[in-house]
């Protein structure tokens, strides 16, 4: 898989490039600024872009905006955004087109090589990888005044969290040490209680859950 990497801190950029190469990714470009990122996204063929939200010269949301513009030019372009802190607005912008193949991770996650590489692969393959802290904040924000969410059992909330991170039923079953049949039952109950259309498409159901959790912002 060909990756474009955008990170302004040299040591982190170099470390991520080495990590990706060690897991059989081809790092097609590793850049440190918004203008450089815009150029390589327009010129190179790639499978996924791993992008820091804040890049020079503005150090605001330059990286995110470059990625969003690239997705407007090339719908469905896989993008995994890295952020120092949970910024729900950035997560919403990334998910706004509903096309999938997106991820939002806190930079702390890159120190867990397996988790980071798994997220990159999932996004490159058209899936969704949302940071658990983003999901937890969305759940916490809505649980106080949202009756359908409040009706979920503790186990259903666990399944919902993992589902919204982009996990398949098999992955959720492995994490919770239950059968896939049990996960499927919990998933059906969640969709019923949240008033969402049941779907066998992992990415579509993740986007549906995220859209529900983000209502009423």
Image (cartoon, helix red, strand yellow):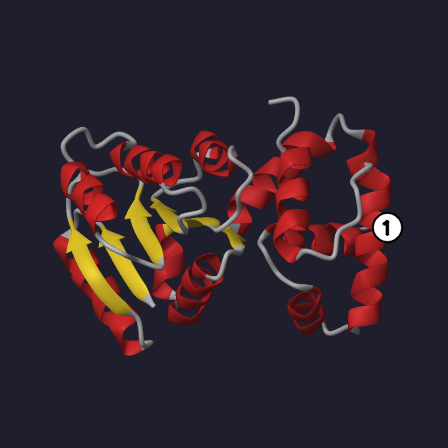
Image point (72%, 70%), residue name: 173
Horizontal side of residue 78 vs 196, given as left or right: left
Characterize the local packing of mark 1: few (<14), some (14-19) or many (20 or more) Cα atoms within 10 angstroms: some
Q: Where is residue 125? Give x, y as percent.
A: 48, 62
Specify the quadrant that holds the C terminus.
top right
Residue 152 appears in the picture as rendered: no
Residue 1 appears in the picture as rendered: yes
Q: Where is residue 40? Give x, y as percent.
A: 19, 48
Q: Where is residue 103? Give x, y as percent.
A: 46, 49
Horizontal side of residue 139 vs 12, given as left or right: right
Q: Quadrant of residue 17?
A: bottom left
Q: How many marks?
A: 1
Up/down of 71 relative to 174, above or below: above
Image point (35%, 37%), residue name: 73
Q: Secondary structure at mark 1?
A: helix
Q: Which residue is mark 1?
A: 189
Q: Quadrant of residue 137?
A: top right
Up/down of 214 relative to 28, above or below: above
Q: Where is residue 195? Give x, y as percent.
A: 82, 37
Image point (80%, 48%), residue name: 198
């Amino acid at each position: 898989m060909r990756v474009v990497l955008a990170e302004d801190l040299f040591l982190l950029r170099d470390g991520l490039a080495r990590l990706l190469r060690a897991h059989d990714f081809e790092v097609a470009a590793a850049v440190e600024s918004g203008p450089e990122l815009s150029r390589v996204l327009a010129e190179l063929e790639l499978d996924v872009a791993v992008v820091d939200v804040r890049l020079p010269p503005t150090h605001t949301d330059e990286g995110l905006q470059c990625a969003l513009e690239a997705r407007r030019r090339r719908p469905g372009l896989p993008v995994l955004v890295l952020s120092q802190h949970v910024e729900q607005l950035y997560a919403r912008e990334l998910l706004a087109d509903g096309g999938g193949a997106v991820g939002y991770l806190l930079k702390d996650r890159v120190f867990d090589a397996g988790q980071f590489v798994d997220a990159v692969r999932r996004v490159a393959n058209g899936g969704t990888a949302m940071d658990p802290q983003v999901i937890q904040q969305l759940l916490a924000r809505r649980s106080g005044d949202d009756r359908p969410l409040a009706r979920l059992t503790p186990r259903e909330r666990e399944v919902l969290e993992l589902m919204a991170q982009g996990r398949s039923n098999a992955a959720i079953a492995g994490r919770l040490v239950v059968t896939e049949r049990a996960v499927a039952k919990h998933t059906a109950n969640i969709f019923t209680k949240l008033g969402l259309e049941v779907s066998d498409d992992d990415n579509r159901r993740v986007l549906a859950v995220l859209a529900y959790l983000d209502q009423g912002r």
